[in-house]
Image (tube, helix red, strand yellow):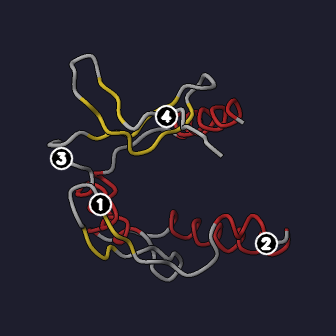
Amino acid sequence: MDWTSPVPLSADDDAGTTWLVRRAWPDRTPGDYVLEVLTPGRPGRAAVAAERCAQLDILLDAGAFVTPRILSRRSQDVIVFSAIPGPTLYEVDSTTDDESFARAWEKWSRAWAGQVSGSKGPAAQGVLNNLPLHSAELEATRVWRLVDLWLHHN
């Protein structure tokens, strides 16, 4: 089968900068895509992501939530995480019956409620005070936008 991707390997902007396409997502109009791009010589986001992971370690109760560890930062763009035990989301979706899923959801819900309502020490409070905030309405709007994009493309 000879299939050519509709997403190019690179794209030039109006200033003539060539951007290498790393990943692509469907945009609002079928056939249009949102691109994750990079260009040589520009800092990556690995440092910010690594810092946010460290902040989550301070916030989350290790007994209730399993999170991956940062194994290494290979570059400004790449972080290598440890594996975490358990099924993938695909495996949960394809092999888990309703009763098992309901038990797992209940366990997660109790842990989350305990996490949110629990007392925070000074380190955790400092992390919380420095997090960027946005409303639940904004988050819901973003999720619905992504759902709509996938529905239009599928």
Residue 103 horizontal side relative to residue 117, left or right: right
Check disc 1: other Cα within 10 Å, few if <14, some if 14-19, many if 20+.
some
Residues at discs 1 and 4 in contact (Cβ within 8 Å): no
Residue 67 coordinates in the image, percent (x, y): 45, 73
* Residue 7 - label: 4
Mark 3: which secondary structure? loop
Instruction: Measure the alpha-carbon separation of dots 3 and 1.
Output: 11 Å
* Residue 78 - label: 1
Mark 1: which secondary structure? loop
Q: Is residue 47 above or below residue 119?
A: above
Instruction: Give the mark, 1 or 2, whose residue is nearer the N terminus.
Output: 1
Instruction: Give the mark, 3 or 2, whose residue is nearer the N terminus.
Output: 3
Instruction: Give the mark, 3 or 1, whose residue is nearer the N terminus.
Output: 3
Residue holding disc 2: 95
Instruction: Give the mark, 1 or 4, whose residue is nearer the N terminus.
Output: 4
Residue at image position (63%, 25%) is 30
Q: Is residue 142 above or below residue 89?
A: above
Residue type (three-letter) at the residue carrying disc 4: Val
Instruction: Measure the alpha-carbon separation of dots 4 and 2.
Output: 33 Å
Instruction: Measure the alpha-carbon separation of dots 1 and 4.
Output: 22 Å
Residues at discs 3 and 4 in contact (Cβ within 8 Å): no
